[in-house]
């Protein structure tokens, strides 16, 4: 199973903490994690294995969206900062739309991500 993780700048620490809190589940289920570049770097520093793609504003969101469309990504955790503007908003909306089109679970906050990961 492949889970994609993305977090806006104000949510990166929250993403790392979420993953550390669920490390046992991730490891026991042999889940492959992919991430946008900066989020992936923060997660690697915390000691988790992750495949890094491009940074979100440089195309990482679009790369994950493509993986969703190709059937490679099974779940997306995208901790968004709804109170900030993002120059790559079109890529974000494309990713969210493709998750809906391909029926891929998408969590945009820790509460929803917790429900999804505990459902594994």
Image (tube, grey):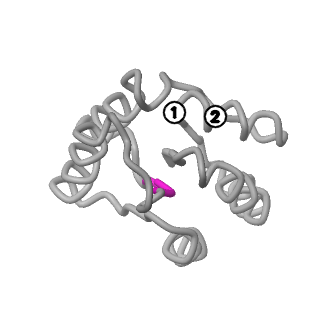
Label 2 Cα neighbours within 10 Å, binned few <14 / some 14-19 / many ≥20 = many
Q: In this view, does 46 lie above or below 54?
A: below
Q: Give the range drawn in magenta.
A: 76-80
Residue at the outermost front position: 84
Which residue is drawn at the image coordinates 44% and 65% (left, top)?
A: 107
CB under 8 Å between callouts 2 and 1?
A: yes
Q: Where is residue 57 in the image (x, y as percent from the top left)?
A: 41, 28
**Dominant secondary structure, magenta:** strand
- Residue 48 position, x and y percent, is 77, 41
Q: Which residue is drawn at 55% across and 77% down?
A: 111
**Which picture quadrant has residue 52?**
top right
Q: Which residue is drawn at 54% across and 48% down?
A: 7
Residue 9 falls within the magenta-colored stretch: no
Q: Mark 1 points at which residue?
A: 36
- Measuring from the top left, give residue 46's x and y in whole percent: 83, 42
Tag 2 residue: 40
Q: Nearer the viewer, residue 74 or 61?
A: 61
Mark 2 → mark 1, Cα distance in angstroms: 6 Å
Residue 105 lies left or right of residue 116; in this view the side is left
- Residue in the picture at 19% in, 52% down: 97
């Amino acid at each position: 199973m492949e889970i994609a993780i993305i977090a806006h700048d104000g949510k990166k620490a929250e993403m790392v903490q979420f993953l550390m809190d669920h490390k046992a589940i991730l490891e026991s289920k042999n889940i492959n994690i992919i991430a946008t570049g900066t989020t992936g770097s923060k997660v690697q520093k915390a000691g988790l294995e992750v495949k890094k793609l491009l940074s979100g504003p440089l195309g990482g969101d679009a790369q994950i969206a493509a993986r969703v469309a190709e059937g490679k990504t099974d779940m997306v955790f995208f901790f968004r900062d709804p109170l900030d503007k993002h120059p790559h908003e079109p890529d974000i909306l494309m990713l969210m739309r493709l998750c809906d089109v391909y029926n891929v679970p998408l969590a945009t906050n820790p509460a929803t991500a917790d429900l999804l990961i505990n459902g594994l």
